[in-house]
């Protein structure tokens, strides 16, 4: 297997990362290409699908160049993606009919409120495991069909294709041969029956969405098609693994047993726990989704999502100009012993789990004449950690048991101060892996399992390696005082 490699495409919210990964998990090649964010009006967030596709082409080409291997040595391609982001494209040309509507977009908040007022909330929650929130794809697709001239009729006629980014990419990779999604991404659309793992006819009827526009739902590890006419990739490479980014990260962390959990620190923060073959319904504002399906074996998850995590650090850099780069936040924050009483609630795109307040806005409290840049930077890191405390509390309540350990990954997990703060607040041991790019790693594992690069889950688990552990060092009484201040700040958001 030493001469066979997996190409993992991690299509994220702000850019695309492509890794060339060997059987031993050595990363042979890597490239990240960012693309612009589009903000047509307050609360709206869009991406140009052509820009996304261009970032994938560049990242694939540069990662292969970095790896210095023959493209023919690529055994398979795996895809992981920003979830819920919605694309509608022409089946004949592959061209999108509108910009992609990003998961952060809040334009359908009023529509979700109207659906709740009409008494549909219970149906959506029971069928999908999700809440009625503009975060998800269903009302985004409804908006596109209603607002793009002629789209509804063309969708009904089978001329248009809907998909989340995974569907759009596999369509492009296979030259239009495959219009599919995987069950993990489908479970985040607000359109899939969670237990049947098929599109829900009652929900399609409520939203008046034509079935003809929807992709087929497949497992997370199988051959969906083969590359054809995609840039520097040779034709004929199996596209054989797909999962939404957070489920892929859980898989990449080898959380294969019930009760194993991870938190990914990316644009947002996402805490998932494996609940096994039976979905666990939340009474505390969490979401129930499919983690993955391999063959007939299904793993469900409970998830809590904070919409803004790394994006808050980007805001410090790009919006306020307080920092030059994200990595320097650790040294800046460490230059002061605490936040000086400052709290930052990073509700820059509303509040996710367990609050579900799309109307919430960011708040900074406790400012004084003594507040410095360092205090604001430290308060930003702590705000990311505080959000996850609320999610973990809800998760432990739903599961009726404490969490023993939490695996962490994503770009911000490299920030030791943030990880120590998180361990102090949670009172749970944090475990950081040797390979923190676990989202791409999960896609690689799923793709490789389908074509024999890895034989089974045991072989995958044995390849996972730990880097560092963080345990609580703060006084529990001080933690409770800090949490009280955080709750008071959230009440103002």
Image (cartoon, rainbow, N blue to C red):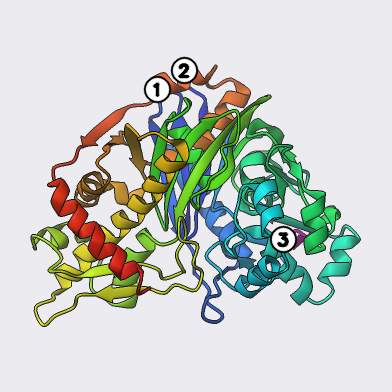
Query: Does label 3 or label 2 sit earlier along the sequence?
Result: 3
Direction from residue 179 to residue 56 in the image, left or right: left
Task: Quickly name the residue at label 3.
Answer: 120
Instruction: Determine the secondary structure under disc 3.
Output: loop
Query: Does label 3 or label 1 sit earlier along the sequence?
Result: 3
Residue at image point 56% right, 69% down: 105
Of residues 44 and 33, which is closer to you in this image? Answer: 44
Residue at image point 68% right, 72% down: 114
User: On the image, which quarter does residue 338 sit in?
Assistant: bottom left
Of residues 487 and 66, which is closer to you in this image? Answer: 487
Residue at image point 36% right, 53% down: 390
Instruction: Determine the secondary structure under disc 1.
Output: helix
Task: Quickly name the residue at label 2.
Answer: 459
Answer few, some or many: residues within 10 Å of disc 2's Cα (few below 14, many 20 plus, some between 14 and 19). few
Instruction: Determine the secondary structure under disc 2.
Output: helix
Contact, CB < 8 Å: mark 2 with mark 1?
A: yes
Bounds of the magenta span?
88-95
Which-is-in-front pick, marks 3 and 1? 3
Where residue 446 is drawn, which disc sits there? none
Task: Quickly name the residue at label 1.
Answer: 463
């Amino acid at each position: 297997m030493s001469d066979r490699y997996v190409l993992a495409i991690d299509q994220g919210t702000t850019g695309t990362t492509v890794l060339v990964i060997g059987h031993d998990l050595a990363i042979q090649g890597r490239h990240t290409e960012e693309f612009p964010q589009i903000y047509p009006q307050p609360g709206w967030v869009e991406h140009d699908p052509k820009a996304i596709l261009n970032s994938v082409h560049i990242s694939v080409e540069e990662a292969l160049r970095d790896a210095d291997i023959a493209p023919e040595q690529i055994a398979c391609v795996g895809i992981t993606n920003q979830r819920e982001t919605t694309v509608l494209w022409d089946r004949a040309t592959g061209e999108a009919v509108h910009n992609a509507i990003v998961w952060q977009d809040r334009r359908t908040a009023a529509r979700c409120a109207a659906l709740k007022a009409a008494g549909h909330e219970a149906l959506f929650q029971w069928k999908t495991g999700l809440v009625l929130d503009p975060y998800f794809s269903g009302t985004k697709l409804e908006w596109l069909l209603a607002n793009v001239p002629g789209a509804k009729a063309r969708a009904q006629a089978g001329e248009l294709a809907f998909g989340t980014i995974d569907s759009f990419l596999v369509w492009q990779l296979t030259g239009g041969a495959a219009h599919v999604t995987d069950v993990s991404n489908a479970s985040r659309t607000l359109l899939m029956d969670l237990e049947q793992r098929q599109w829900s006819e009652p929900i399609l009827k409520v939203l008046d969405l034509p079935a003809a526009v929807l992709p087929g739902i497949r497992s997370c590890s199988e051959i969906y098609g083969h590359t054809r006419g995609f840039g520097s990739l040779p034709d004929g490479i199996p596209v054989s693994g797909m999962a939404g980014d957070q489920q892929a990260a859980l898989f990449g962390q080898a959380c294969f047993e019930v009760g194993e959990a991870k938190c990914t620190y990316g644009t947002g923060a996402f805490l998932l726990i494996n609940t096994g073959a039976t979905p666990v319904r939340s009474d505390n504002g969490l979401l129930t989704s499919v983690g993955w399906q391999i063959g007939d074996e299904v793993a469900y998850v409970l998830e809590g999502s904070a919409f803004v995590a790394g994006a808050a650090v980007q805001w410090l850099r790009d919006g306020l100009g307080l920092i030059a780069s994200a990595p320097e936040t650790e040294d800046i924050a460490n230059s002061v012993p605490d936040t000086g009483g400052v709290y930052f609630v990073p509700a820059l795109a509303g509040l996710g789990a367990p609050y579900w307040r799309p109307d919430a806005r960011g708040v900074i409290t406790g400012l004084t004449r003594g507040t410095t840049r360092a205090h604001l930077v430290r308060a930003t890191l702590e705000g990311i950690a505080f959000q996850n405390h609320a999610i973990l509390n809800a998760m432990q309540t739903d599961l009726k048991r404490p969490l023993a350990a939490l695996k962490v990954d994503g770009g911000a997990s490299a920030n030791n101060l943030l990880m120590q703060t998180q361990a102090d607040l949670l009172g749970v041991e944090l475990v950081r892996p040797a390979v923190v790019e676990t989202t791409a790693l999960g896609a690689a594992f799923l793709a490789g399992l389908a074509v024999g690069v890895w034989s089974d889950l045991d072989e995958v688990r044995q390849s996972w390696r730990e880097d560092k552990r963080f345990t609580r060092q703060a006084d529990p009484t001080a933690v409770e005082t800090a949490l009280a201040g955080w709750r008071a700040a959230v009440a103002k958001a």
